[in-house]
């Protein structure tokens, strides 16, 4: 069933090897003052920084820079960007990088003209944004989060040891335009590529594992899972396979531009647990998701057995005769775990810097929710211990 | 592979049993003068007309009406609407009906302030629209064309015996908002329901049968085909099954809002042939597509054999051992034909009013194109004869 929804996603996507050629005409739609937000040095090494700067200057723009955004963007960086926006009357925030840079840029947009404490209002209290926001746009250099076509903004408050996600309304905060060139992702190191791949896969599963009726969105989510698995296997063999990388990039965007989530209640608990893992360690987001997912799904599959059976059959082609539904569902999770191993991702929390002492702190601070089952602190702790 | 594209679809969809409640707040965004476009009497019988009129009057709007739009909307109706738009300085064209009413409304929008002959410029010559256009919005009462979320406008010029499609840019002409309540489709007669269902299925196949590499869009198109088949079978048993009708309605919109067509070259030849069938007979659009499709695909499958094998396997689960690729592909088309029979759709052109004398005229006037193979007049004639 398709339950009630309202959907409008106005992001303009420019996709392909020549997508950057569209940047000048897009920039012409905005005022002179641009805040350029980016990460570490990679865009300077691969030439993307120079291309963007040349186009900005040829367009007669004044450019203010905010470099150094972390893979888990920090609230202090949001505040710094917000100050730059106000001081320079910024007309457009241009994010050049991966999801963390785009997430940070949306946070800056919301925070710049916020009265009071933006962290408390927009991430802790999840208040609606009523202040002026500054348009955000992106040039994507890593794929995974779909931040290029949604309103998501996950920010880490280091002082409070909290990593909180905020999903701003699409019409308010989805980037005005995003430039997606799959070739830009060729130089991403392999461990970041597979982290991004599993982030995508996790988004798809977290939207999928909810509801128990026949719903078009579930078919679409299965389709992207199947395409992603095939493309990932090709990209592992040859990271410069354009076919594979372009499919992965589009799977990422489709995977969380919210059009496949319509009418789904969803279950984002794996992301909630990972956010707190990210607040306590430097574990890359997708790697954390991959470590936690099999453990989490082995906890909750019983509560949504028909859907886990469907998942095992349709995604992992579990069709051995004579298995019970429970065995089929568990075999599906086993195959998921095997795929994670195939991606070369670590399978335990200790490999990514977590200590036994951290586990209760992570479990306690995790926001509790769920889909087929709502978890408590003890259950989250058990999930963590089972993959420690 | 995902080939280069630019995509932006700004339509706001309100979906569900209470979707109409959003109409007043949407109307508040536009000026006072509304052109209300609708079809025959059905919206007066089922109360939708009264509800819309009440909301328009409560919103202080001046309403001009253009009733009587045909299932194949006529160019004379486009011109009549264009005159009403100019004479009443219309601020919003509100289409209440099925795809033909929405298509006609877009035609009116493009034609109203066009200098010169709109038919010649926008449908025959396919010139870009540079004149002012009037915003279009829709309240959907039948499902199939996805005109509620795309820029399509298929118009029949009776004087010239030509039915031509125009795909206006999404950002220019996609409805500003569309209201989709699956319950509104309950009262559509069964022959119109199945016509709509096959129109959707045809859109999916026509986007799917092109290209030969691994492309995420193909997985998504398969997903909607599978969901549509399941939902259609339930709707045949109980037309008031909300689960089934809501899935069908969303399959229709997703099926042709162009997000599943990205990077696909596509093959719209079945639609081209059917358009000319529609110019010579009163055959409902989806019925014509259903009659022509198996005959057309039996002509061209050899040119795209791997894709037809994939279609047979993934959509119709053809997995008998020992079949050659050609046999698998043909069995897939046989299953498609069986599905059409299951829908209770006539299988020959003579049943829908075509005469033998019409066939050469239809074949001659059909716009020739294709995907895996570009057809000529003789081949179109053969396709028609094979389903006569």
Image: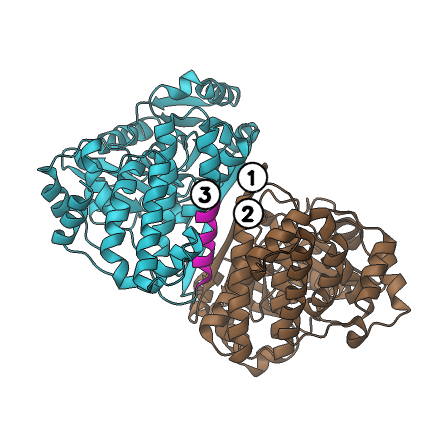
Chain colours: A brown, B cyan
Query: Which residue is situated farthest in the left direction here?
Result: B357
Tag 2 and tag 1 share a subunit: yes
Bounds of the magenta span?
B215-228
Tag 3 and tag 1 share a subunit: no
Q: Position of residue B360 (x, y in %)?
A: 10, 44
Q: Position of residue B311 (x, y in %)?
A: 39, 56
Image point 33% across, 30% down: which residue?
A: B85
- Residues at badges 2 and 1 in contact (C-beta under 8 Å)? yes
Q: Find residue A218 and name its label.
A: none
Read off the chain for label 3: B
User: Relative to the observer, which residue lies in front, B45 or B299?
Assistant: B299
Q: Going from the N terminus, do you reach mark 2 or mark 1 first?
A: 1
Q: Position of residue A206 (x, y in %)?
A: 66, 54
Badge 3 crowding class, 10 Å Cα cut-off, few under 14, some 14 to 19, many 20 or more, is many
- Determine the CA span between mark 3 and mark 1: 13 Å
Q: In the image, A316: left or right of A113?
A: left
Read off the chain for label 2: A
Image point 75% across, 65% down: which residue?
A: A74
Query: Which residue is situated farthest in the right direction here?
Result: A357
Q: Find residue B228 and name its label.
A: 3
Identify the secondary structure beneath mark 3.
helix
Badge 1 crowding class, 10 Å Cα cut-off, few under 14, some 14 to 19, many 20 or more, is many
Q: How many marks?
A: 3
**Pointer 1 residue:** A2
User: Relative to the observer, which residue lies in front, B271 or B351?
Assistant: B351
**Pointer 2 residue:** A217
């Amino acid at each position: 069933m398709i339950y009630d929804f309202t959907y409008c996603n106005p992001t303009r996507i420019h996709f392909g090897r020549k997508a950057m050629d569209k940047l000048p005409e897009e920039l012409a739609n905005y005022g002179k003052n641009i805040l350029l937000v980016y990460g570490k040095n990679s865009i300077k090494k691969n030439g993307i920084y120079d291309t963007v700067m040349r186009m900005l200057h040829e367009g007669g723009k004044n450019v203010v820079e905010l470099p150094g955004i972390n893979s888990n963007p920090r609230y202090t960086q949001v505040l710094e960007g917000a100050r730059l926006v106000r001081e320079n009357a910024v007309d457009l925030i241009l994010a050049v990088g991966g999801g963390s840079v785009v997430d940070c840029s949306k946070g800056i947009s919301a925070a710049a003209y916020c009265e009071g404490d933006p962290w408390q209002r927009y991430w802790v209290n999840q208040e609606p944004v009523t202040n002026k926001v500054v348009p955000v746009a992106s040039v994507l250099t890593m794929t995974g989060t779909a931040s290029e076509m949604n309103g998501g903004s996950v920010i880490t408050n280091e002082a409070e040891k909290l990593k909180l996600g905020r999903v701003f309304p699409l019409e308010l905060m989805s980037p005005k335009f995003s430039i997606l060139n799959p070739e830009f992702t060729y130089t991403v190191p392999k461990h970041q590529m597979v982290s991004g791949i599993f982030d995508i896969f996790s988004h798809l599963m977290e939207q999928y594992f909810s509801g128990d009726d026949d719903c078009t969105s579930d078919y679409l989510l299965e389709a992207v899972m199947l395409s992603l698995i095939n493309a990932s296997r090709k990209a592992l063999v040859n990271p410069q396979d354009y076919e594979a990388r372009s499919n992965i990039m589009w799977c990422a965007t489709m995977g969380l531009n919210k059009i496949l989530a319509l009418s789904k209640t969803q279950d984002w608990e794996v992301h909630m647990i990972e956010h707190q893992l990210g607040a306590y360690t430097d574990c890359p987001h997708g790697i954390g998701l991959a470590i936690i997912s099999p453990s989490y799904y082995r906890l909750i599959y019983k509560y949504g057995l028909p859907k886990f059976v469907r998942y095992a059959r349709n995604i992992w082609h579990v069709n051995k005769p004579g298995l019970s539904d429970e065995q089929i569902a568990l075999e599906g999770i086993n195959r998921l775990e095997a795929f994670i191993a195939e991606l070369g991702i670590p399978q335990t929390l200790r490999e990514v810097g977590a200590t036994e002492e951290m586990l209760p702190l992570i479990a306690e601070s995790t926001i509790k929710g769920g889909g087929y089952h709502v978890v408590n602190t003890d259950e989250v702790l058990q999930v963590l211990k089972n993959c420690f």
